[in-house]
Image: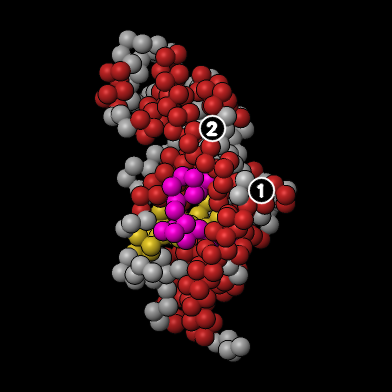
C-alpha cells in the first residue's frame, strides 16, 4: 500500500439531497480528481446532514448510490480516494454528540445557513438544523484533516469547526488537528442561469436556473438558450453590470479552457444566441462522458457496493482512532 503518512489529508463532502448540479461539478468535483496525487483524500456522501430537511427515503437511497457512481465517473478513482457514505461510519454521530456539548448556543445561532434554511423550512425548524455545524465539525475532525475544500459560502463552517477544536484542545490537550479551508484556485462559483445574482442550486425555484450533471443534452441546451443575459448584446466579462453574461463566460471558460479575453474575441460582433448555443454545447460535451459512465456504473450495483463498503472500512479505521482518544479524554469508561 502506498505510504500516505506524509501526505496532507483532505476531507470534503456533498449532501445527496438533490441531483448533482453543474455548479457542484465545476465548483468542486472537477477539481477533486487532480488532488489525489498530492493529498490523502476522503470524500463523503453527507446523508446524515441531508435529513435536517424531510426526504423521501427511496429517493435518498437512489441519489446516494447515483452520487457514488457520479464521483467515480468524474475521475475520483476509488483506489486513490476514500469514497464513503457518512451514515456507514457511526463515529460521525458519536463525535457529533460530544462536540454538541462543546459548541455554544450563541455560535450556532449566528450561522447564516441556519437562518436561510429556517426561512425556507419554517414548518420544520428542528434541532438538527440548528446543531448540524457540530456534526460538520465532527466530520472534519474525525479524520484529522489538514484541509477542507470549501466554496466561499462555506468558510463559516470551517471557522466554527476550528473554534470548537481549539476549545476542546484547550481543555484536553492536543486532540484535534486544526483544519484550514482550502479554496481551489480554479473552482468556479457557478450562478443560476435564470437569476444570475444567486448561486446555482438544486433548490432553485425556477427549474431552468439549474443544470444537472446527468441531464439529457437536449434539456441542457434548452436551459442555456433560455439563460438570462442583458440588452447590450456584447460578450464582455463584467460581473457587476453583466452578471448573466459573465456567469456564462465563466462556465464556458472552465468547460473549454479559453480565457475571458479569448471568449470576448471569439464572440465579438456576434449575438447572444450564438454565444448561448456555444456555451450549452461545451457543457453537453463536458458532461457527456460522465453521464454515460455513471449510467454504466449504476448497472453494476455489486461494484458500487464494494467501493462504498471498502471506503467505510478505511474511513472507520481512521475515525475510530480519533473517537477513542476523545472518549478517553472526556472521561468515558473504556468498553
Instruction: Place residue 39 in its image quadrant.
Output: bottom left
Of labels 1 and 2, the one closer to you: 1
Q: Secondary structure at mark 2?
A: loop
Judged left or right of residue 311, residue 10 is: left
Quarter of the image where the C terminus is located: bottom right
- Residue 102 pos. (x, y %): 53, 72
Residue 175 shows up from this direction: yes
Q: Relative to residue 216, is residue 278 drawn left or right? A: left
Q: Which mark, by number, is residue 211?
A: 2
Q: Which residue is mark 1?
A: 62
Task: Tell me which residue sits at (57%, 42%) in the image.
Answer: 296
Task: Work out whether residue 307 or residue 45 is closer to the camera in this orientation and state it.
Answer: 307
| Callout 2 crowding tier (Cα within 10 Å): few <14, some 14–19, many ≥20 | many
Q: Nearer the viewer, residue 288 or 281?
A: 288
* Element class at badge 1: helix
Q: Residue at x 40, y 11 (%)?
A: 271
The range drawn in magenta is 70-86
Q: Residue 330: x and y, percent?
A: 53, 83
Queried whether the magenta region covers residue 81, the answer comes back as yes
Residue 227 percent location from the top left of the image? 50, 22
| Quadrant of the frame with the N terminus | bottom left
How far is disc 1 from disc 2 in space, using C-alphas? Answer: 19 Å
Q: Is residue 227 above or below residue 82?
A: above
Residue at left offset 50%, top offset 73%: 317
What is the number of the mark on residue 1?
A: none
Q: Residue at x 37, y 34 (%)?
A: 254
- Look at the image and tell me whether residue 181 can be seen: no
Amino acid at each position: 500500500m502506498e505510504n500516505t503518512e506524509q501526505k496532507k489529508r483532505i476531507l470534503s463532502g456533498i449532501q445527496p439531497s438533490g441531483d448533482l448540479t453543474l455548479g457542484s461539478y465545476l465548483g468542486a468535483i472537477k477539481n477533486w480528481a487532480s488532488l489525489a496525487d498530492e493529498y490523502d483524500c476522503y470524500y463523503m456522501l453527507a446523508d446524515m446532514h441531508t435529513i435536517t430537511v424531510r426526504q423521501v427515503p427511496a429517493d435518498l437511497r437512489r441519489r446516494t448510490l447515483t452520487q457514488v457512481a457520479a464521483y467515480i465517473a468524474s475521475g475520483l478513482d476509488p483506489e486513490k480516494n476514500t469514497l464513503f457514505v457518512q451514515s456507514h461510519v457511526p463515529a460521525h454521530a458519536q463525535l457529533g454528540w460530544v462536540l454538541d456539548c462543546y459548541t455554544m448556543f450563541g455560535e450556532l445561532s449566528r450561522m447564516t445557513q441556519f437562518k436561510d434554511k429556517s426561512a425556507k423550512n419554517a414548518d420544520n425548524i428542528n434541532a438538527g438544523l440548528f446543531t448540524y455545524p457540530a456534526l460538520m465539525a465532527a466530520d472534519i475532525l474525525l479524520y484529522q484533516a489538514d484541509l477542507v475544500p470549501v466554496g466561499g459560502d462555506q468558510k463559516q463552517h470551517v471557522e466554527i469547526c476550528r473554534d470548537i477544536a481549539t476549545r476542546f484542545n484547550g481543555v484536553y490537550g492536543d486532540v484535534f488537528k486544526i483544519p484550514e479551508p482550502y479554496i481551489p484556485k480554479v473552482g468556479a462559483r457557478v450562478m443560476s442561469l435564470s437569476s444570475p445574482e444567486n448561486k446555482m442550486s438544486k433548490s432553485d425555484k425556477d427549474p431552468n436556473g439549474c443544470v444537472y450533471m446527468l441531464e439529457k443534452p437536449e434539456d441542457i441546451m434548452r436551459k442555456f438558450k433560455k439563460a438570462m443575459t442583458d440588452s447590450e448584446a456584447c460578450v464582455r466579462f463584467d460581473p457587476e453590470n453583466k452578471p448573466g453574461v459573465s456567469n456564462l463566460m465563466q462556465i464556458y471558460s472552465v468547460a473549454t479552457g479559453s480565457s475571458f479575453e479569448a471568449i470576448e474575441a471569439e464572440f465579438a460582433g456576434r449575438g447572444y444566441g450564438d454565444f448561448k448555443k456555444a456555451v450549452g454545447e461545451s457543457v453537453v460535451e463536458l458532461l457527456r462522458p460522465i453521464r454515460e459512465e455513471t449510467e454504466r456504473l449504476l448497472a453494476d450495483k455489486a461494484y458500487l457496493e464494494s467501493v462504498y463498503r471498502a471506503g467505510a472500512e478505511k474511513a472507520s479505521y481512521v475515525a475510530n482512532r480519533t473517537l477513542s482518544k476523545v472518549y478517553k479524554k472526556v472521561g468515558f469508561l473504556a468498553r
